[in-house]
Image (cartoon, rainbow, N blue to C red):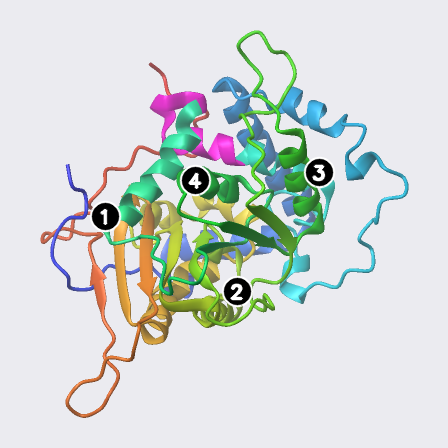
Amino acid sequence: MDQCGGGTEPATAESQPRTAQSGFGGLAQQMLNVALASPIWKYVLVPQARASIVKTAEENGIPWVAAKEWLKSQKDAPWNDPGHDNHDDVSYPTYYRKSFHAYSEGNLSYDAAFEQELASRAIGARNFPQYSNRGEDVFRGAFERALSRIGARLRRIDGENEVTIVDFGCGTGTSTRRLAKRYPDEAAKIIGIDLSPYFIDVGRTLLKLAPEAIGGGRSEGWIADVDADPRIQLRRGDIADTRLPSNSASVVNLGLVLHELPTSVAKRVVREAHRILEPGGQLWVSEMDFESPAYRAQRENALLFSLLRATEPYLDEYADGMPALRNYIVETFDKVKIAAATGRHYALVAEKGLEDRTNGDGEKVRGLEDYRFDKNMKYAVEDTHLKPWESKQDL
């Protein structure tokens, strides 16, 4: 069944700005803001959020503890090499130094890097609980199918150029490796870029080790099979200023990154993606949709939303700024399509035109085709996500 839904008019549903809330909801939000600025955040909300995701993992057959210990114990890994660069001399943007994902140092620690793919597996299990430890594969597959439905494709623009995919905010390389596996013949180079040198260290180590997953009689290993692929390059860098040549990429992939950025930085990232894309190249975005009924309902309940906000410092700004950021993408690119991927996430394809399209007055033509809602404004994909207090679906 095609889940794109109705026509091509932009959806009118919008997330409710937090400042517009009143009554008990507004009071609860004010109380939550105080809590997030106090030691309660560090000593209560963050441990609770972390415990919830670890519980989700273990109860869904994801060996969080065993896999992390296996990775930490690798003798030849950078974190076990006394002579390895400890990255103390690397400078980072101010926004990036905030606490993220229950880590006081944010993404700037090996502990966060060890657990990134573990957490991603657990989140997949929460989004598609009926698939348990395979939920992440279904989750990522949902984005891939949605992107394909709205025109995502690799195309060699110039017969003399090799096809290059650039994966913005690659983390430890989960999405980069998946792109490589998805395009074994079409892509000559897949470049993953992330600001955290710790994440890049872990990603490169996994590619070097190429481990098998725990299970099937194996008591040691990673949470998934990792295939070594010489086409993959993991680089530490700023996705708002990649230093890559202009017009050099066929695709820029931006998967679940924008909600972790201030809106001003997100716009710079979009502009950088446009700069490095070849004419005819595409930006692929996979993201949280706070205009979906599921996330709107969760966000309107300040107490239920507190677990998410406790570990995502820019989530409110992202939710409030979704329409403006989408409009910026439309203004920057030549053709933009968006569709529901899950019951609370969207996929977006933005194409850099081969040439500027203009109307009779010489003005550039921009357009958005929005397939997230049907003609009755019902979200096109049913929500299957676990409730905030659940860790496993009862079968």
- Name, please, the residue furthest toward the left: 375
Viewer-side residue, 54 vs 192: 192
* Sequence-wise first label, 1 or 2: 1
Residue 34 visible (yes or no): yes
Residue that carries the numbered disc 4 in the rendered image = 184
Mark 4 packing: few (<14 Cα in 10 Å), some, or many (20+)? Answer: few
Amino acid at circle 4:
Pro
Instruction: Label the magenta part by its dominant secondary structure.
Output: helix
SS for tag 4? loop
The residue at the point 20 percent across, 62 percent down is 369
Q: Give how far apart the Cα atoms at labels 3 and 4 are.
A: 32 Å
Q: In the rendering, which numbered label is found on residue 262?
A: 2
Q: Which residues are magenta?
A: 120-133
Q: Which residue is mark 3?
A: 111
> What amino acid is labelled 1 in the image?
Arg
Kindly report the distance in space between the C-alpha atoms of the residues bearing marks 3 and 1. Answer: 37 Å
Q: Quadrant of residue 128?
A: top left
- Crowding around mark 1 (Cα neighbors within 10 Å: few <14, some 14 to 19, many 20+) is some
Circle 2: residue type: Pro
Question: Is residue 122 located in the magenta-colored stretch of the structure?
Answer: yes
Q: Amino acid at mark 3?
A: Asp
Location of the N terminus (image quadrant)? top left
What's the distance in space between the residues labelled 2 and 4, CA to CA? Answer: 34 Å
Locate residue 177, reporting x and y percent.
Answer: 51, 40
Q: Return the disc, 3 or 2, that comes first in the chain's sequence.
A: 3
Question: 224 or 132: which is nearer to us?
Answer: 224
Pointer 1: what residue? 149
| Mark closer to the chain start, 3 or 4 | 3
The label nearer to you, 3 versus 4, is: 4
Q: Is the residue 308 above or below the residue 324 in the image?
A: above
Name the element at disc 3. Answer: helix
